Image (cartoon, rainbow, N blue to C red):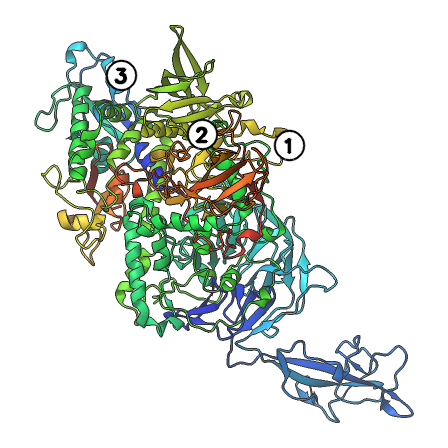
Amino acid sequence: MPSSVLWAVDLFGKVYTLSTAGQYWELCKDSQLEFKRVSATTQCCWGIACDNQVYVYVCASDVPIRRREEAYENQRWNPVGGFCEKFLPSDRWQWSDVSGLQHRPLDGVALPSRHWEWESDWYVDENFGGEPTEKGGWTYAIDFPATYTRDKKWNSCVRRRRWIRYRRYRSRDAWAKIPSKDDPEQLPDPFNDLSVGGWDITDEPVGRLSVWAVSLQGKVWYREDVSHPNPEGSSWSLVDTPGEAVQISCGPHDLLWVTLWEGQALVREGINRNNPKGSSWSIVEPPAASENGIVHVSVGVSVVWAITKDRKVWFRRGVNSHNPCGTSWIEMVGDMMMVNVGLNDQVWGIGCEDRAVYFRQGVTQSELSGKTWKAIVASRESDRSHSGSSSSLLSAGCFFGDEVRGSGESCAPSDTDASLEADRLGPDQPVPAESVDSPRNSRDSSASGPGTGRTTERAVEVPGPATQTSGPEPGPATQTSGPEPCPGLASSPAELPWTNIDLKEPKRAPGHSAAGFPETTGLSSLGLLPLGLEEPYGADDHPLWAWVSGGGCAVEAHAVLKWFTVQSGLSPSVQTHSLSIMPAQTAAWRKQIFQQLTERTKRELEHFRHYEQAVEQSVWVKTGALQWWCDWKPHKWVDVRVALEQFTGLDGARDSILFIYYVVHEEKKYLHVFLNEVTVLVPVLNETKHSFALYTPERTRQRWPVRLAAATEQDMNDWLALLNLSCCESRRVHGRPSPQAIWSITCKGDIFVSEPSPDLEASEHRLPCDQMFWRQVGGHLRVVEANSRGVVWGIGYDHTAWVYTGGYGGGCFQGLASSTSNIYTQSDVKCVYIYENQRWNPVTGYSSRGLPTDRYMWSDASGLHECTKAGTKPPSLQWTWVSDWSVDFSVPGGTDQEGWQYASDFPASYHGYKTMKDFVRRRCWARAPPGCTWARTSPSLPSPSGAATRCGPWPGMAPPSTGALCPPPNRLGTAGTTSRLLPSRD
Amino acid sequence: MTDDKDVLRDVWFGRIPTCFTLYQDEITEREAEPYYLLLPRVSYLTLVTDKVKKHFQKVMRQEDISEIWFEYEGTPLKWHYPIGLLFDLLASSSALPWNIIVHFKSFPEKDLLHCPSKDAIEAHFMSCVKEADALKHKSQVINEMQKKDHKQLWMGLQNDRFDQFWAINRKLMEYPAEENGFRYIPFRIYQTTTERPFIQKLFRPVAADGQLHTLGDLLKEVCPSALAPEDGEKKNQVMIHGIEPMLETPLQWLSEHLSYPDNFLHISIIPQPTD
């Protein structure tokens, strides 16, 4: 079997090929361009480059691609001049095509593109019908158009002869640009996806190809006249579709599937030799078992593979020429970015997490769905010369070994940058010293931060009773925006596993990484990218792929491939490590367990659901003793008994009621709360009480939540976690927040998330904001921003940028309410400011002896609350002081050398120098209480530095030196809608 | 993405459809209909078969009733083995539902323990939990728990309350951050082909060189006969909870996620079905 090649594009847009006989990815011979997508056949490969133009790469071969150009020279006889150029008015051109209808002067015949060259000059074809002619190749006839003969007869009134010139396609082994279809007058509509196929349509001329493309605006285009002798085709023609297309796949035979933006697939019917464009569309609904739409399809001769938005892989059953729509979907194993069906219906895919190219093993004509995914571990040819540095790969591998060992907790993305990884705290590792330092560093940066930011903060930081009961203000402050497909996104149905990509190598070449995404379809200035990144990749560079095309790759069902082992140059151990580089979440064994459990449940339960359960569900009650901030005056904490009753409804739904039993005037009473009515549970930690507040819509209206306090922090966390779990259960909210979730922050920095109703845009069901249900996510932030695709970033009080990993729970939510992975320690630092106030008196000068009407001599900024150095506590139990009090000299208005600010009286405007009229002065003392690293609160884990800790799904980004939000390493911030919630301030 | 939590749920809510039939030689007053039930895999036969007992006692005379016991294809079913283990070990290759014969006579004294009451099951269950914690944490965690926590574990199992059970059981699944796992993995390996009831040895989750031990490592060490020879055909299935985890699966993870409520990994080695 002659070798053939698999085409693939890496994340940086570089095109590589892997031969079926080879073991290395070879860089495409023409490597000047970066590509987003390629679609290969055995003879050529079409691609969309990062400049949004379409290119075709015709593989070199011994047989040249030649095209004959013809022109006919016509003459009419007249009695005066014999045969000459004098025609009757009704006659054809002197120089024409064969039909005579088109004017075709020899010098007017131009090369179709700069990829062709003339082989020779024009010459007269002296042959006619296989026989030589006389007299310069003329053929004779009575009149145009008629039958021509070789011989001049008495009645031959016209004659013609054929001129011939050959042109040759010269851009072999190079990317030849296909002229843009776009009218410069109109907005450009570049192509977003393309697919080449159709080389096996029954009885068609050999070498004919169908090239289909989808443009950014969702239109489907067909390239006319593409064939081996005419590799560029002639023109694009629009094919009407009933919906907005995002992706297209054309099989070798007569299958053509298109993905629609709405998640269905379109199937072209009526494709045959005479009508390669097909005649009509039918719609195939996405798999019913998945709530997600299709984002990608790939078709072969009689198979269709698809990917849904949740990255699940599906196989379409029953597809063939007679029924191109198939019958039903089957879910396959694996999470893939994309799949591609190549020759012989072999299948390749790109793994979602590790971005490796996988080959579907065991695909045969009888078992088209194959058996398993196998990662292609062939290294790039350019890596070979760098095998000397494989030790770094080893060390990276060791690190990942550790990660895997951390049981379910680890979620290291397939990143080989060990140092980067090491910075991210493994949840099971003791917190390294640097993280203890980091709050201090960041405090410095916060002190030097922009003054405005600080002053606003100042007002918030003062602990005061007003803030004690304030829940997250889910009210109008939440500028919510639903998931709106914006045009940029419309063309990029694929979702990136962004935790993996964006944290990766932002320093290397941000432009390149951005350009490498197949989804980068924006009209941004991609053409400005530096071309030809020539420096070879280091050997520790595990290749990350963006696109693969097997249309030119013929793998026989039982062929032996050398793709699956790392060949010489790298030690054999590297291979095992490269396997362990797979994040624990995607490890094969784990996936297999998930899948087998699902299969087991199906096998053992599906047909037996009508059987009686052996154990009937019953009501379950948890009781305990708490304190309750009583509803009547004088308000005080009273001891109460509480009981949480959980029961299972007939429909299997769980509901719970919280009873609070209290005694008033020696009479036993109780109040109860249905947990399905609870809108939010907020920890309130700013006193010495371990308390939390429970809101319902009614309680929100009354501005009077149910406040409960527990004896110990552990006890409170248990209750909080249990109540939260019950709330979530009764509202059927579980798992990670959806990409559309609305995020908010309380003035204490607690993070809450709310799921919008699925029909955000349906105005008749608008959810009043006091009825939105908020659940807490561990972590501490000052600002959070989300877009509609699940990308969530936040900024801590210390100006560190954090990115949301997709975990849930964290904080006090351990055990069942928390995800086992994607939980990291988070630390935050904030400054607390108090004011020392003094009044001048004639005896002692400025002293702390004020007038009776004066404010406290130690107060907050407003002067209304006394805040002494000793009496000012960290904002909550989770905070500890990391520094002592010190005078703050950087207050607005300036200070004198001792930090004092002067004014004529309280409250007034302060200035930094003393005048005759100033009778009062104040100075600001600052203290950073942070140290509050949000680490795991597992009882077995010693808390770092004795500070209380919390955790959340927020791995940190390096704090930018300026203290401002660092620009995202790539295009994260550019698309999508945002829901912004600033911390509410009193 | 599927979370490890879902594994716990799937394991807990595993059910085996079972058809209980009265033994033919039992004397009945009228025809005894078979009784169909979904048995929780993680529970114990005598804990969840009150309904079965009532059903068959209705058709029997009081004097013919002595202690109930169960048999599958001639093998008396040990009530002190979790149901899932019994099924995997004895019946996993047969068609569902699982056909269990109910006996009220001729208690096989040499094969089965008596189960006079639920207390006996509780005592057995708690002793297993304690033994497991002795292996995992030198009994530190279980001893620090209060009596009510122990009760909650048991009540969680008895009432099939996943949340109630795991609220406590998660503490038994923790380990010090500086370690990479438990001290020893509580496991038992069962084989139908040997006389020995099960294999149980001390086995650490982490090798001396820091590598995580896998299921394959465990089998190689304590039950090499279960493994297929290097080039040979697979002769045995290694089954936990009705699934065959890959031999590469880290043992610590298995112990945390696929242990039965008694905190033991009950691993069945059964001959590969030849179909």
Residue behind mark 1: A763
Q: Quadrant of residue A806?
A: top left
Mark positioned earlier in the residue sequence (1 or 2): 2
Q: Are marks 1 and 3 on the same chain?
A: no
- Residue A951 vs A246, above or below: the answer is above
Residue A682 is tagged as 2
The residue at the point 62 percent across, 49 percent down is A486
Is residue A655 left or right of B68 when viewed as pictured? right
Residue behind mark 3: B55
Q: Quadrant of residue A93?
A: bottom right
- Residue A299 vs A478, above or below: the answer is below
Q: Are marks 2 and 3 on the same chain?
A: no
Residue A233 visible in the picture:
yes
Please, what secondary structure does the residue beneath circle 1 have? helix
Please, what secondary structure does the residue beneath circle 3 have? helix
The residue at the point 53 percent across, 80 percent down is A63
Q: Position of residue A149 (x, y in %)?
A: 76, 85
In which quadrant will I find the C terminus of chain A?
top right
Please, what secondary structure does the residue beneath circle 2 have? strand
Is residue A691 left or right of B249 when viewed as pictured? right
Q: Nearer the viewer, residue B24 or A850?
A: A850
The residue at the point 31 percent across, 50 percent down is A432
Q: Are marks 1 and 2 on the same chain?
A: yes
Mark 1 and mark 3: Cα distance apart in space? 56 Å
- Residue A878 vs A5, above or below: the answer is above
